[in-house]
Image (tube, grey):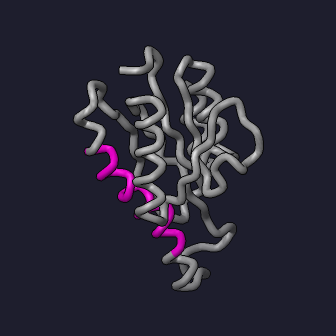
């Protein structure tokens, strides 16, 4: 094991809830890696950023493999990457919009699961918290519950 600190991977950590979560984990003593589609080209942050597009299998594999190469472990995964079409409801969205939302917000989480299984062989268990939601769910409504504890 390379690291004494717990290592957290936060998808969608370039802004909003993902960024706030990464900062909170950093303050709690985790070694935090954030992800965004832009990766290191995203704005400067107090934690390293990796390029990860949750809609692309190769991108998921590459990002997780890079983090395992750097740290040798992943202890916590926060699947935060996602987006919504505000203020549109499902019946106001096109099929193309709905497919894009599901590919990111649902299939993006599913894409991370095989990479989690690959980490089970490492000395530390990769634990993670998942919440399932309506893809049109406003994640800001979840923010109070996550950060009030």
Which region shows up in magenta? 100-117
Image location (x, y in percent) of residue 112: 38, 52
Residue 101 against residue 66 in the figure, above or below:
below
Magenta-span inclusion, residue 107: yes
Q: Residue furthest bottom?
A: 95
Estimate the x, y position of residue 94 in percent, counting from the top left. 57, 85
Outermost residue on the top side: it is 4
Q: Is residue 141 left or right of residue 5?
A: right
User: Hey, which residue is sitting farthest front in the picture?
Assistant: 69
Q: Residue at x 39, y 30 (%)?
A: 72
Residue that lies at the very extreme toward the right in this rendered image: 43
Numbered disc total: 0
> Viewer-proximal residue, 84 or 109?
109
Secondary structure mostly seen in magenta is: helix
Q: Is residue 61 magenta?
A: no
Quadrant of res 120: top left
Q: Residue at x 53, y 41 (%)?
A: 10
| Left/right of residue 2 with respect to residue 16 in the rendered view | left
From the viewer's perspective, tell me whether residue 86 is left or right of residue 5.
right
Image coordinates of residue 134 in percent, x first then y, are: 47, 62
Residue beneath the point at 23% across and 35% down: 121
| Most foreground residue, 144 or 127 | 127
The answer to which of 32 and 67 lies nearer the viewer is 67
Q: Quadrant of residue 97?
A: bottom right
Quadrant, the C terminus:
top right
Q: With 123 as the anchor, is 34 left or right in this view? A: right
Relative to 9, residue 31 above or below: above
Residue 78 vertical position relative to residue 93 in the rendered view, above or below: above
Q: Report the residue at 60% width, 34% height from top.
A: 22
| Closer-to-camera residue (67/125) | 67
């Amino acid at each position: 094991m390379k690291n004494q600190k717990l290592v957290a991977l936060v998808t969608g950590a370039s802004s909003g809830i993902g960024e706030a979560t990464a900062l909170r984990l950093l303050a709690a003593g985790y070694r935090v890696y954030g992800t965004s589609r832009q990766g290191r080209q995203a704005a400067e942050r107090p934690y390293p950023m990796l390029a990860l597009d949750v809609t692309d299998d190769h991108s998921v594999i590459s990002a997780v493999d890079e983090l395992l190469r750097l740290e040798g472990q992943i202890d916590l995964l926060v699947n935060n990457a996602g987006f919504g079409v505000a203020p549109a409801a499902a019946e106001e969205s096109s099929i193309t919009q709905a497919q894009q939302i599901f590919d990111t917000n649902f299939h993006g989480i599913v894409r991370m699961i095989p990479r989690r299984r690959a980490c089970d062989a490492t000395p530390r268990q990769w634990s993670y918290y998942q919440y399932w939601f309506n893809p049109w769910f406003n994640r800001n409504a979840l923010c109070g519950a996550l950060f009030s504890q």
